[in-house]
Amino acid sequence: MSATPTSLDPRIITRGREFFSSISGESPSVFNKGWWTGKVMDWAMKNEDFKVQMFRFVDVLPYLSTSESLSRHIEEYFAGDDSNIPDVLKWGATKTKFGGGLVAKVLNKTIRSNIESMARQFIIGQEAKEAVKGIKKLRKDGFAFVLDLLGEATVSEVESAAYRDGYLEVLNAIHKELDKWNALDNGAGGLDWGHTPKVNVAVKPSAFYSQSKPVDLEGTVDGMVASIEPVYKKVMEMGGFMCIDMEQLKYKEATVELYKRLRTKYPDYPHLGIVFQAYLRSVDEDVSSFIGWAREVNLPVSIRLVKGAYWDYETVLAKQNDWPVPVWTHKPESDMAYERVGRYILENSDICHFACASHNIRTISAIMESAAELKVPEERYEFQVLYGMAEPVRKGLKNVAKRVRLYCPYGDLLPGMAYLVRRLLENTANESFLKQTFADEADMDRLLENPAETLRRQLEGKCVTPSEDKCGMPRFKNFPPADFTLAAERDAYPASIAKLRKTMGGTVPLYINGQDVTTADTLDSYNPALPSEILGSVCQAGVEEVDRAVEAASAAYLTWRDVAPEERAEALLKAAQYLKDNVHDMAALQVLEVGKQWDQAQADVGEAIDFLEYYAREMIRLGKPRRMGRAPGEMSHLFYQGKGVAAVIAPWNFPMAISVGMVSAAIVCGNPVVYKPAGSSSCVGRALVDMWKAAGLPDGVFNYCPGRGSVMGDHLVDHPEVSVIAFTGSMEVGLRIQERAAKVQPGQQQCKRVIAEMGGKNAIIIDDDADLDEAVLGVLYSAFGFQGQKCSACSRVVVLDSIYDRFVERLTEAAKSVKLGPSENPANYMGPVVDKAAQQNVLRYVKIAEEEGRVLVKREVSEDLKATGGCYVPLTIVGDITRDHRIAQEEVFGPVLSVMRAKDMDEALAIANSTKFALTGAIYSRSPRNLERAYKEFRVGNLYLNKPSVGALVERHAFGGFKMSGVGSKSGGPDYLLQFLDPRLVCENTMRRGFAPIEEDDDWLS
């Protein structure tokens, strides 16, 4: 696509000046300092701290149902001594406890009323009758409308159905009034302006199907179509127009496919539109391919082009995940894209109607001049602005373009507050055209200049961030999680699974001292979704094989410990590259062997890569001798050497990540390894052999010894030549290992170091002001992701009494909406547990839960899936659980969630801390004071504020707990490698005959 011709610039600027002149002296009401809203907005634009606090307060306000909670939050958000809050608001906040509560009540009522009034400024009505009344007034003033129902976040199919019914309700109300409305400009055929329907609605498709997710494109589109089609039929019955909104990037592909299905299913009805976002780097390709499709099927279409409302979300998400940032990172780039793509749409006006949605006078002028130059008929394009914003812009537009439509949100104030926050953030952003125009009174020439010139100015003198760490290596970054918006990523998993099925099923040998070793004793590893499907017949090590492996490791230790730390680190980096090159194959193995979902399996491999990359850098850091003290005449250096042979006993729930983490830590520190994987994941364990071979590891440094714990487990732990034992698993086994390791065996020359992570009974607290849209999904994912088989999984949710019923209702409906079945099908949220032993254990605890509490949800797979013999267990949620119940104290390691009620935060914290475990925890709260309390008093190894309790990342969330959750430092953290090392210090006397060389860092005379 070509940019707006520079020859048009003088005309664009002239038109823009005329536009500014026509609205001279006017200002949007949101910036009117004579009103409370204007004063608040003015202060927010001057003070970033206040802006953040104010918008967060607006967000939580609908949940503050009592005078006490409102008063408390006002004080927490605004009464700090150093908060730099406007005097009038600070005065009110600090007085909330005085006057026998009278002042508090008056103040609370005033603040609530002011904020609700501010919200109503952007919302055309809370009920259908109110919305219809507002629409009639707009039309009387000569404006068309597009109606958007608030409440986009749906966590269950019940909520999605209610959202759909909300549209049908308001459409029915409009239908009753429709015949009374005259067409705008007395349009022919009862059409506004003679060519467009009087009724226009916008739909956000993800809200219509709560199970929308990019990994399941087909299922997502099917769900969206089924739920939105009744609304579209009603719109067609009314002779109306429906526009499909574009939301976050993750829904883009599904949204486009949804449009195509509806448009081709009803080819004779042309009034269907779609939104594209100019802030996406892909917008040129998105729009050109869409219009190309329209020409291919020979169907007229309509596009509303917007700048985009999720810039911060998309940018933060991309940076967190180390994905390419999908949006333009400089505002002028979005403006350039808008002009470029807008012109392209106008060039295709014969088949594509254009709705120009912008408040930017430069953008509007560019579109108008492009349309004039291209001689686009007026009926082929219109202008749209947001209701409640930019009143002067819409007035000026109506004067010159006539065809102006207002985007009108409608619905309850509760979801409306989230919309209000987005609008306020847009208006107060430094890049906001409205702010620059009406609040900052920026120079008109700057506002109307070509965005390409604006970009050039912004990029001048831009500084570059250093990309290397102190080791001289690229800074550590976590491996990116799977981006399922990419078709290639979605296609890779079925392909890798199919490839694996062609080769699996053979004998899996041990690997000792660089050689494959077979044994007569074997154990079949099977697919838990289909136990008749064997992945491999795994040879089992006995005492003899363990002795051979330890002997090989002991011999390798004598040379490996003296290999330079940089060389050992290089082996880890090569191993990491091998995993990166084979990430989908490694993930497929976990999908079939342990029943991990695609994203969970990829994250497991990604974490393994992270451990390799992080520990390589850590060893280079620790490998440099460190001078101790600065006294002249002596030189003291502290350095490290590996402890000796390490026995690594790994779990099945993170069969690659935790295995690689423990093994690589030992190896990079100079300790050869005897590795015992879990029986249920031994094929994944064997993949480590290929990984270390690719890294060029010397023989004997890594030895793969799967075996039955009852046969060889104690022997490996007790072996006198084993110096380090790294274990992840149950508390019972971990305590046994510690007990046995404490006993000195004949010939043993070193105290054994035990590093043990032993599980948890993790709680999530739901405060009375929690954002339930996030809390419900966070708890659901924490409790039932990978069937609850994570040591960090949530098994207790502690809910404050005042929000208990609302939370439980939404949680149970959400749990009833997810799909159950084999993990290789991306539509399924929850699959089988790892094996038959785990199945029996979970079923035992389900029975205990049923006896101790009240079953809220117990969902099982279909009879067809049960008939396969798969290791399925019910998704179970029980209520009425107290801290004394077994189900609230014992680790289940499966999809069983206890819901516990607390009268206040004191009791909630007491319940959360009431077990012998202290691994992970989380709290969902919008109370600054309660978040601070949790920070100090919720005593677990990893605490997450307003996040799920699972999903720890290497370095960023160094992982590990205390009490009975384990012993040792946090994996993926700066202290972890020290556990595998013995520190040594060498001190040299550098004085000779009274003379000593003076070092640069000596404590010497100045």
Image (spheres, rainbow, N blue to C red):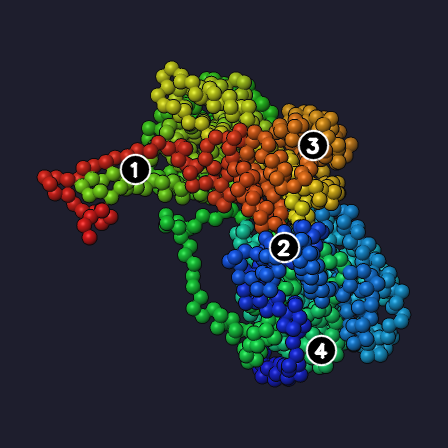
Q: Marks 1 and 3, Cα distance to the nearest angstrom? A: 53 Å
Q: Which residue is mark 2?
A: 98
In front of the other: label 2 or label 3?
Answer: 2
Residue type at mark 3: give it: Ile
Q: Which residue is mark 1?
A: 638
Mark 2 touching mark 3, by CB under 8 A?
Answer: no
Residue type at mark 2: give it: Phe
Residue type at mark 1: give it: Leu
Q: Which mark is residue 881?
A: 3
Q: Looking at the image, is mark 1 or mark 3 earlier in the sequence? A: 1
Q: Quadrant of residue 840?
A: top right
Residue 174 picture location, percent across and down: 85, 64
Q: Residue at x 68, y 70 (%)?
A: 389
Residue 888 picture location, percent across and down: 65, 30
Q: Looking at the image, is mark 2 or mark 4 earlier in the sequence? A: 2
Residue 285 sits above or below residue 162 on the image: below
Crowdedness near tag 2: few (<14), some (14–19) or many (≥20) residues, C-alpha within 10 Å = few
Residue type at mark 4: give it: Lys
Q: Which residue is mark 4?
A: 395
Tag 3 secondary structure: loop
